[in-house]
Image (tube, helix red, strand yellow):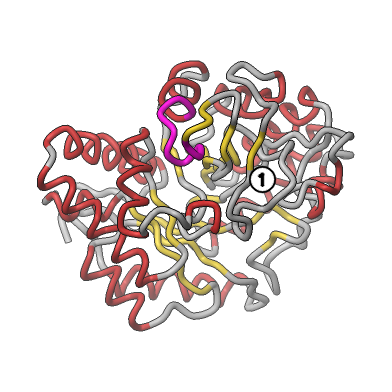
Amino acid sequence: MSLAEQVGQVVMVAQSSTQASRSGRATIRRLHLGSVVLLGNSTAGRSRTARLTSSLRRDVGRVDGVGLLVAVDQEGGLVQRLQGPGFTRVPSAEVQSGWSDKTLRTRAATWSKELHEAGVDLDLAPVADVVPRSVGTRNAPVGALHRGYGADPVVVARKDVAFVEGMHAGGTATTLKHFPGLGRVRGNTDFAAEVVDGTTTRRDALLAGFRSGVQHGTEAVMLSSATYRRIDPDHPATYSRTVVTTMLRGDLGFSGVVVSDDLLGEALASTPVGTRGVRFVQAGGDLALVGSVGAAAQVHRGLLDRARSDRAFRTRVQQSATRVLELKSGQGLVSCSGS
């Protein structure tokens, strides 16, 4: 791949879950963007979603034999993007936590098969954040939305593993989120400019879900955009080498794809859009998720300009592109023949 194509592999751009825009398809094709995330709730059902993903892949083409990866947030409860005929209604993680591990594994396999048949490769789930009882619904990103598996890190770890194993059985890759945990914060990083965790430590017991999920083969881990005062007080996790390289890669031994949360979240707003992807990749991240087409083009330009002028950064981009290609290969998106 050319350098521009490698940079494209490390950018994931949002597209509507009901109808990908003409400008979005053109931008994905022009910049060789390698992944899309389907945003917004859809009740179109499995067959219509499959037509959407198929037409999107056909229109944007392949890059040197590498196809487009399609991701979606399909956690359950309030966060189930794809609904309608052919998609089972998925209950919240709070409800799932009351099931046996075997039941959750079996049902997750069913949900996964539905996603796979709809042309989805990667589920941005499960949530591995532990929300202590002392915080509960005052935790805006997880507790208030019933997105977590509870307050006991041992239980959360078991449920995360069951979900991951079920998804794998159905052919869908998984993403643990939001490392190193959003369970103790109050604000939502999508909407609040400053979200700080003053409690979580490098070897915190509440990391159990991430540790177990990594051990059981999750393909991706999504970072939190909060700042962790007792880990790296000077950087949000998105830009923190301590969080990404020291903790996730080193302590947990994760060798897969590190995904950002939406780089357009308010918690990252103090950094120019074109610089956000650069700082994320410098920290050790691999796949920059960007919530709009125009911003994705800015992130791509920032990454490409830096890679052209900085040999060490160019090597980092190559490492990240390789990890993304390994994930794609596991999902059958890489062929020997070029486009």
Residue at left offset 40%, top offset 63%:
13
Asked which quadrant contains residue 289, the reply is bottom left
User: 86 or 93, which lies in front?
Assistant: 93
Q: Which residue is rendered at x = 37% and y = 71% of the image?
A: 293
| The one of 160 and 44 positioned closer to us in this rendering | 160
Q: Is residue 164 left or right of residue 316?
A: right
Residue at the image point whose x is 18% and y is 47% from the top:
306
User: For numbered disc 1, what is the local secondary structure?
Assistant: helix
Q: Which residue is mark 1?
A: 109
Residue 236 inside the magenta-drawn segment: yes
Magenta stretch: give its range: 235-243
Q: Quadrant of residue 177?
A: top right
Q: Residues within 10 Å of mark 1 (few under 14, many from 20)?
A: many
Vertical relation: 229 (above or below) 273: above
Q: Nearer the viewer, residue 5 or 172?
A: 5
The quarter in which the C terminus is drawn is bottom left
Tell me the amino acid under the disc marked 1. Answer: Ala
Instruction: List x then y, in percent, for residue 36.
Output: 42, 61
Q: Is residue 84 left or right of residue 7?
A: right
Residue 110's place in the image compared with 97, above or below, is below
Residue 205 at what x, y percent from top left?
71, 19
From the viewer's perspective, is 90 left or right of 19? right
Q: Whole-percent x and y of residue 256?
A: 42, 32
Inspect the magenta stretch and tell me whether residue 77 lies in it. Answer: no
Q: Main secondary structure of the magenta part?
A: helix
The number of numbered discs placed on residues in the rendered structure image is: 1
